[in-house]
Image (tube, grey):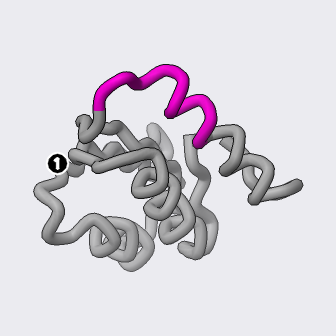
């Protein structure tokens, strides 16, 4: 999920897809991110979802260069989902999937 070219267009399309494919909110949503293996960067992502009841799993790549971060969390609506993507996007080197 790349937002580099036009972030606002990307988020508008994502919101449309979430509204079209999801009939009932709130729901459990799965976020997936790839981040350079740096404990501080991983902690930044985890802090964004702090106090939300999120279940966070991390897994290092085979060479240990990157870490995947999977987050299962109950989200209230498409706007809340997008707000979290925007918050995470400020973490240096993060890739949203």
Q: Is residue 54 left or right of residue 66?
A: left
- Chief secondary structure of the magenta portion: helix
Q: Report the residue marked by disc 1.
A: 55
Residue drawn at the location 29% of the way across and 36% of the way down: 25
Say which of 15 and 49 sits in front. Answer: 15
The quarter of the image holding the N terminus is top right
Whether residue 97 is situated above or below residue 23 in the rendered picture: below
Residue drawn at the location 35% of the way across and 37% of the way down: 30
Measured as percent of width and height from the top left, residue 75 is found at 29, 48
Q: Is residue 70 left or right of residue 89?
A: left
Say which quarter of the image contains residue 90: bottom right
Q: Is residue 3 left or right of residue 58?
A: right
Q: Is residue 63 left or right of residue 54?
A: right
Whether residue 24 is situated above or below residue 35 in the rendered picture: above
The quarter of the image holding the C terminus is top right
Measured as percent of width and height from the top left, residue 89 is found at 58, 66
Q: Please tell me how crowded label 1 is: few (under 14), some (14-19), or many (20+) other residues with Cα within 10 Å.
A: some
Whether residue 84 is situated above or below residue 62 in the rendered picture: below
Residue drawn at the location 25% of the way across and 41% of the way down: 26
Residue 21 in magenta stretch: yes
Measured as percent of width and height from the top left, residue 40 is found at 38, 79
Q: Secondary structure at mark 1?
A: strand
Query: What span is in magenta?
Result: 15-24
Residue 46 seen from this side: yes
Residue drawn at the location 76% of the way across and 58% of the way down: 7
């Amino acid at each position: 999920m790349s937002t580099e070219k036009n972030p606002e267009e990307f988020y508008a399309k994502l919101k449309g897809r979430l509204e079209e494919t999801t009939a009932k909110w709130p729901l459990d949503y799965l976020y997936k991110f790839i981040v350079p293996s740096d404990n501080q960067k991983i902690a930044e992502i985890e802090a964004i979802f702090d106090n939300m009841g999120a279940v966070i799993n991390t897994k290092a790549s085979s060479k240990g260069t990157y870490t995947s971060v999977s987050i299962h969390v109950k989200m209230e609506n498409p706007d809340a989902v997008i707000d979290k993507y925007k918050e995470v996007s400020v973490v240096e080197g993060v890739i949203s999937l």
